[in-house]
């Protein structure tokens, strides 16, 4: 519990420092927040490792998976914050990671799943894909807000915390491309390593994941072939991400939290 409390405290400290830095200089905030953020993420990971030791293996139940995805989101936004001028996204990702870590700790540790190394690889790729594409969804929302503000000529100071529109759009599609690659690897390892992929308790997840993969692929094709951008890119990104959330966390939440069936 100590690891969780200290991690959450550091998440809150780093969020506060970042918010103050963005108020002082939205376009180039100081990096003082990165140290407590990095420590918070290290303790966040350590809390999961300690839990896995308690149950003698990886714990990937609903809240554990959410916590790991949020850890990945926090890590990605922190890593590229200065280079890509997306520090503002960390304002969302850091406290979200802290909140989901608390939810994981409060929900308790489920018995470990019996996963061989191939299935662990599949699960790791899946969590990385979800985290990457969740960051893409945040970028899509930021892009939509920025475009709306520009159309209305409402140039608020906080918009300076975001990169220029063209750069933000480019970052969105680069992030989607990485996430699409990870999602492709996830589906391939699922076909190769997961038995009964279309079993009753997995069929919804599999079908929705494939639909999400097709949607992200269509978006990347549309961008390359037809120059899709702006509102169309935002809609496709959020729709594809919605399918992905339903694929894993929707079905997993119903099975675990409503039907009390471990998956």
Image (cartoon, rainbow, N blue to C red):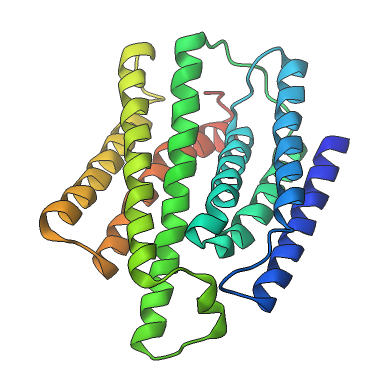
Residue 195, can we see it?
no
Name the residue rendered at 43%, 65% in the picture: 141
Q: Quadrant of the N terminus?
A: top right
Front-lying residue, 117 or 108: 117
Residue at 68 percent across and 64 percent down: it is: 30
Whole-percent x, y for residue 83 in the image:
51, 56
Most foreground residue, 156 or 108: 156
Residue placed most toward the observer, 64 or 181: 181
Asked if 77 appears above or below 144 in the picture, the reply is above
The structure residue drawn at horizontal position 41% and vertical position 75%, both measured from the top left corner, is 146
Q: Residue at x 56, y 23 (%)?
A: 262
Residue 57 image position (x, y, % from top left): 66, 14
Farthest-out residue, left = 225
**Residue, far bottom:** 153
Q: Is residue 104 above or below residue 169?
A: above
- Looking at the rendering, which quadrant does residue 130 occupy? top left
Rendering coords of residue 219 (x, y %): 22, 52
Q: Quadrant of residue 150?
A: bottom left
Q: Is residue 150 above or below residue 171?
A: below
Q: How many marks?
A: 0
Q: Is residue 210 above or below residue 188?
A: below
Horizontal and vertical percent for residue 200?
A: 36, 23
Q: Is residue 41 visible?
A: yes
């Amino acid at each position: 519990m100590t690891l969780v409390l200290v991690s959450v405290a550091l998440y809150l400290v780093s969020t506060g420092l970042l918010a103050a830095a963005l108020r002082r200089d939205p376009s180039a905030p100081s990096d003082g927040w990165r140290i407590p953020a990095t420590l918070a993420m290290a303790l966040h990971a350590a809390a999961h490792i300690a839990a896995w030791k308690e149950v003698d293996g990886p714990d990937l139940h609903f809240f554990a998976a959410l916590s790991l995805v949020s850890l990945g989101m926090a890590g990605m936004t922190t890593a590229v914050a200065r280079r890509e001028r997306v520090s503002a996204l960390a304002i969302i990702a850091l406290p979200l990671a802290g909140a989901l870590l608390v939810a994981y700790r409060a929900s308790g540790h489920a018995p470990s799943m019996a996963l061989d190394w191939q299935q662990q690889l599949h699960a790791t790729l899946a969590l990385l894909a979800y985290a990457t594409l969740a960051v893409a969804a945040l970028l899509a929302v930021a892009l939509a807000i920025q475009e709306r503000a520009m159309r209305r000529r409402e140039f608020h100071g906080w918009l300076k915390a975001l990169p220029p529109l063209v750069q933000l759009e480019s970052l969105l599609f680069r992030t989607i491309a990485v996430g699409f690659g990870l999602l492709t690897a996830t589906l391939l390892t699922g076909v190769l390593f997961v038995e009964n992929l279309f079993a009753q308790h997995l069929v919804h997840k599999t079908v929705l994941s494939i639909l999400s993969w097709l949607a992200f692929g269509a978006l990347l094709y549309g961008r390359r072939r037809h120059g899709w951008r702006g509102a169309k890119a935002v809609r496709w990104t959020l729709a594809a991400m919605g399918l992905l959330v339903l694929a894993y966390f929707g079905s997993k939440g119903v099975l675990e939290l409503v039907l009390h069936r471990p998956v």
